Image (tube, grey):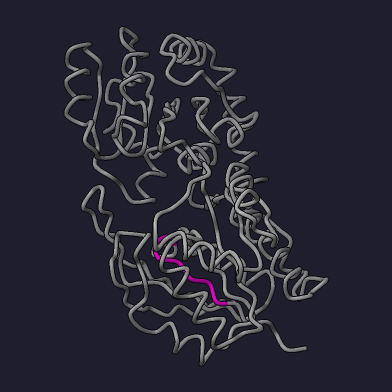
Amino acid sequence: MNKPRILMISFTSFIQKFYQTLPQEIARQSGWDVTVLVPPYWKELWSGGVKHLEKNSDPHYRMVVGDIRFTGNLHLAVFRGQLKRVLGEFRPDLVDLENEPFNLGSFQIVRATRRLLPHARLVLHASQHRFKHYPPPFNWVERYVLKRTDAILARNQMAVEVLQRKGFRGLLPIITHGVNTEAFFPRKDEEICRELNPERKMLLGFVGALEEHKGVHHLLEAVRGLDVRMVLVGSGRMRGHLATLARKWKIDVQFLPPASHEDVARIMGCLDLFVLPSLTRANWVEKFGRVLIEAMACGVPVVGSSSGEIPRVIGEGGLIFREGDVLDLREKIQRLLQDEALRRELGRRGRQRAVEHYSWKVIARRTLEIYRQLLGRTAPDNEQTNRGGGS
């Protein structure tokens, strides 16, 4: 039997080497032919930063780089070249596109695949958190794509409910984001820890956008008067206001710019506590919170708000407070600061949860189950490599 050919396409994630662990695991566990199509870079419109492709040399799969138009805007981004060539030369049995059904790139890739390879299976991804009627042309795009897609990997239960209401009838499993548990693991880089926390106070951290909906101003208010040090990693429009609050309330805070995954892993290893105080807004809710599983993989106890998917992501691996409730957040933080045994236990549980539920090895195995259903493969092609430690 010929090995299935899988084409995985991403405008953003696979640019970063830690996320390339997923196609590597897909190829390694199955023994199938895997090709990845990515752009050379992605511009973040909200921060102005540019993420360039971190190309790893990996024997398990092949990477093809294709130029795109409208970098930084996932609604409009489309490939300028390479797409039809890859489809024509590689002739995949299954195309897995990491993109929402209403984006123009989804229309481009679904349309090209159906024209060139009408029997190929199509898989998309979705994180939609509320039912919404999109304006033209995005509503037309969504209808076209949903009718021609075989499976959508939903990041959360909210997306499942939205897509069911919109009439999608294909496979609709929940398969979340993942974390490289070999890069994010419990450790303390003493040099970095000294730089971050020279006075050896209890160190609390946040990583992400410094925007109002992330609730960092509530976090600062919650630690007001506590003998702790804060490290806030990220950028955004709230940075100046947060710095003003820290000075006003005499909070010991260090602001760091957005960091690479390697640096985030090293910073998290120094934390005593990680907090994600997100706030639900009319047009936004925390749809997952990747930084939570990164902190949990590092064995850091986490505290998260009740916004969106945060409680389900944390599970038994941390504490949840009522979003927007500063007193409740303060109580949870003080409880952990005063109870070293509880911090150790939650750190252990968080690490275990990250390995068992969110490691790329687990995400790849669950993804392959969907691929096999679509391709009529009832058993693993490479079963022996489907066992072992997590990544």
Q: Is residue 90 above or below residue 333?
A: below
Q: Position of residue 169 (x, y in %)?
A: 69, 60
Answer whether residue 56 is visible to the viewer in this image: yes
Q: How many marks?
A: 0
Q: Closer to the camera, 241 or 233?
A: 241
Q: Closer to the camera, 377 or 205?
A: 377
Taking the image as shown, residue 219 lies to the left or right of residue 355, namely left
Q: Position of residue 303 (x, y in %)?
A: 50, 25
Answer whether residue 276 is visible to the viewer in this image: no
Q: Position of residue 327 (x, y in %)?
A: 43, 9
Q: Closer to the camera, 275 or 122?
A: 122
Please give the name of the residue rendered at 28% of the width and 45% of the height, measured from the top-left corner.
Answer: 258
The quadrant where residue 85 appears: bottom left
Quarter of the image for the N terminus: give it: bottom right
Please give the name of the residue rendered at 17% of the width and 16% of the height, measured from the top-left corner.
Answer: 247
Please give the name of the residue rendered at 43% of the width and 27% of the height, measured from the top-left corner.
Answer: 275
The quadrant where residue 230 appears: top left
Kindly give the residue lying farthest to the bottom in the view shown.
89
Quarter of the image for the C terminus: give it: bottom right
Taking the image as shown, residue 319 lies to the left or right of residue 107, namely right
Please give the name of the residue rendered at 39% of the width and 63% of the height, measured from the top-left corner.
Answer: 137
Q: Position of residue 75 (x, y in %)?
A: 37, 60
Kindly give the residue lying farthest to the right in the view shown.
378
Q: Is residue 121 magenta?
A: no
Q: Is residue 252 above or below residue 294?
A: above
Taking the image as shown, residue 10 lies to the left or right of residue 365, namely left
Taking the image as shown, residue 381 lies to the left or right of residue 236, namely right
Q: Is residue 241 above or below residue 382?
A: above
Residue range highlighted in magenta: 7-13
